């Protein structure tokens, strides 16, 4: 989570680079801090990905009506400001993203859905929808080391991590063709499905609360 959750109030954000630990234990590590700004102004974002071949950093901002993929400089500077520029549209209210280990695919998830793209070195091309499991508050996604599975996580203590096959050629994921965006005027695109999913959860919660109140009477 890069931060600025109030919709773009911070003049800059920090991202950190640290060595991946060999063992997951409590320890102190030395991290490198980078100052980051967006060329088109401050914004909320939760998705940071690193190209496994070039090491270049990318950020996807979090916007209910769809966001953008922001490309960082070829090499981050620890002594100056690093400007990230928008290079592609992402039709999703993105909560996390990941690039496959073979550098071929970008997976982006939201609360109730997801999209996968051909990565193409950051020049993404939409391919289809992800088979995102139903979770309380879908906030995380990553590939397994061998690149065969996508791991989906939710917010909250002791929440389950669920594995799904990585989509690809010949997969059963719905087609990603068309120009529907997260705002989805017709409700037929991914955005429409996400909002319908959110509404369904809200309605279900309201029904449960109503039943509890009736039982108390």
Image (spheres, rainbow, N blue to C red):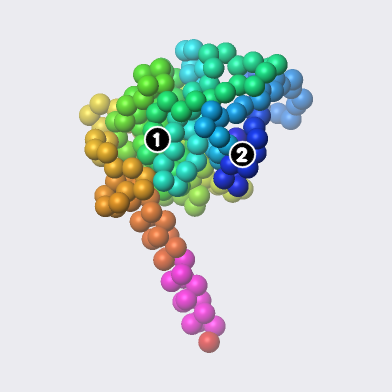
Judge from the rendering whether residue 76 lies leftward or rightward of residue 209; answer left or right. Answer: right
Q: Is residue 21 visible?
A: no
Residue at figure coordinates x 27%, y 36% from the top left: 176
Highlighted range, magenta: 205-216
CA distance for labels 2 and 1: 18 Å
Earlier in the chain: of badge 2 and badge 1, it is: 2
Residue furthest front as drawn: 40
In what element is the residue under mark 1?
A: strand
Judge from the rendering whether residue 141 lies leftward or rightward of residue 177; answer left or right. Answer: right
Q: Is residue 32 visible?
A: yes
Tell me the crowding category of disc 1: few under 14, some 14 to 19, or many 20 or more residues within 10 angstroms, Cα based: many
User: Residue 3: which numbered mark, if any?
Assistant: 2
Residue 46: percent from the left, percent from the top? 54, 37
Q: Nearer the viewer, residue 53 or 87?
A: 87
Does the magenta portion include 208?
yes
Does the magenta portion include 44?
no
Residue furthest right as drawn: 28
User: Residue 202: which numbered mark, if any?
Assistant: none
Q: Which residue is mark 1?
A: 90
Residue 35: percent from the left, percent from the top? 66, 25
Residue 21: percent from the left, percent from the top? 66, 21
In what element is the residue under mark 2?
A: loop
Residue at figure coordinates x 54%, y 28% from the top left: 39
Image quarter of the N terminus = top right
Residue furthest bottom as drawn: 217
Q: Quadrant of residue 106?
A: top left
Q: Is residue 107 above or below residue 100?
A: below
Q: Nearer the viewer, residue 183 or 170?
A: 183
Residue at figure coordinates x 33%, y 42% from the top left: 181
Judge from the rendering whether residue 49 lies leftward or rightward of residue 30; answer left or right. Answer: left
Tell me the crowding category of disc 2: few under 14, some 14 to 19, or many 20 or more residues within 10 angstroms, Cα based: some
């Amino acid at each position: 989570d890069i931060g600025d959750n109030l919709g773009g109030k911070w003049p800059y954000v920090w991202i950190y680079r640290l060595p991946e630990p060999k063992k997951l234990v409590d320890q102190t590590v030395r991290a490198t801090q980078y100052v980051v700004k967006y060329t088109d102004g401050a914004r909320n974002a939760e998705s940071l990905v690193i190209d496994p071949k070039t090491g270049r950093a990318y950020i996807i901002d979090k916007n209910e009506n769809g966001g953008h993929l922001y490309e960082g400089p070829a090499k981050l500077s620890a002594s100056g400001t690093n400007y990230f520029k928008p290079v592609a549209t992402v039709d999703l209210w993105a909560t996390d993203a990941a690039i496959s280990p073979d550098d071929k695919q970008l997976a982006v998830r939201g609360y109730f859905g997801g999209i996968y793209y051909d990565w193409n070195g950051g020049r993404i091309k939409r391919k289809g929808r992800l088979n995102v499991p139903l979770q309380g508050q879908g906030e995380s996604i990553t590939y397994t080391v061998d690149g065969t599975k996508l791991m989906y996580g939710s917010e909250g203590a002791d929440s389950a991590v669920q594995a799904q096959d990585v989509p690809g050629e010949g997969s059963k994921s719905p087609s990603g063709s068309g120009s529907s965006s997260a705002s989805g005027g017709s409700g037929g695109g991914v955005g429409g499905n996400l909002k319908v999913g959110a509404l369904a959860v809200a309605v279900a919660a309201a029904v449960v609360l109503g039943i509890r109140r009736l039982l108390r009477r």
